Amino acid sequence: MLTGYHAQPGVIRTGFVHIGAGAVVGDNSVLDINTEIGAGGQLGHASSLHPGQVVPAGESWHGSPAQAGGVPVVLPDACRVGRARRFRFVLGQLLTMVFFIAPLGLGIAIGSAWQPSD
């Protein structure tokens, strides 16, 4: 989650989030404002960087708040995806949007605007 701001009563504070080349951010991790992951650095799954924390280049951090050490994040092997698979995915997404999401949204809009007659 990268919001880029921190809300406090009466004020919104903004800050930077820097992710270096080849860095890995694990699933469900949170990076607060003014945080950085250096090139090749890793932030483990479900970990968080609090304001001002920096993961140095090439290091692996884990936890909440994140701390140095631990086992490096294991990345899955890359796989090749052909044109036919890409086409089927896009077609499936479009069909889902046209035949499910749009009618559902239209039904909700009509239902919320409908006023029963007395």
Image (cartoon, helix red, strand yellow):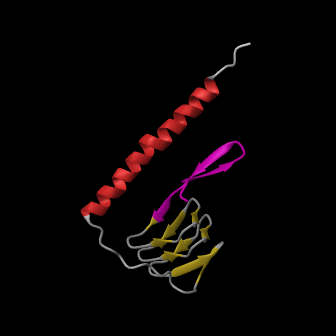
Toward the viewer: 26 or 34? 26
- In the picture provided, is 1 more to the left or to the right than 58? right
Please give the count of numbered marks on the rendered protein: 0
Q: Is residue 3 magenta?
A: yes
- Give the residue drawn at x 41%, y 74%: 39
- Give the residue drawn at x 44%, y 41%: 99
Q: Quadrant of residue 81?
A: bottom left
Toward the viewer: 1 or 99? 99
Name the residue at the right extreme.
118
Toward the viewer: 27 or 50? 27
The quarter of the rendered structure image containing the C terminus is top right
The quarter of the rendered structure image containing the N terminus is bottom right
Vertical position of residue 78 compared to residue 17: above or below: below
Q: Quadrant of residue 50?
A: bottom right
Measuring from the top left, give residue 54's x and y in whole percent: 54, 72
Toward the viewer: 15 or 45? 45
Measuring from the top left, give residue 18's x and y in whole percent: 46, 64
- Give the residue drawn at x 44%, y 47%: 96
Vertical position of residue 115 compared to residue 7: above or below: above
Q: Is residue 115 magenta?
A: no
Measuring from the top left, give residue 8's x and y in whole percent: 69, 49
Name the residue at the left extreme.
83
- In the picture provided, is 61 more to the left or to the right than 87? right
Magenta residues? 1-18
- In the picture provided, is 89 more to the left or to the right than 55? left
Measuring from the top left, give residue 16's x and y in whole percent: 51, 58
Vertical position of residue 42 compared to residue 100: above or below: below
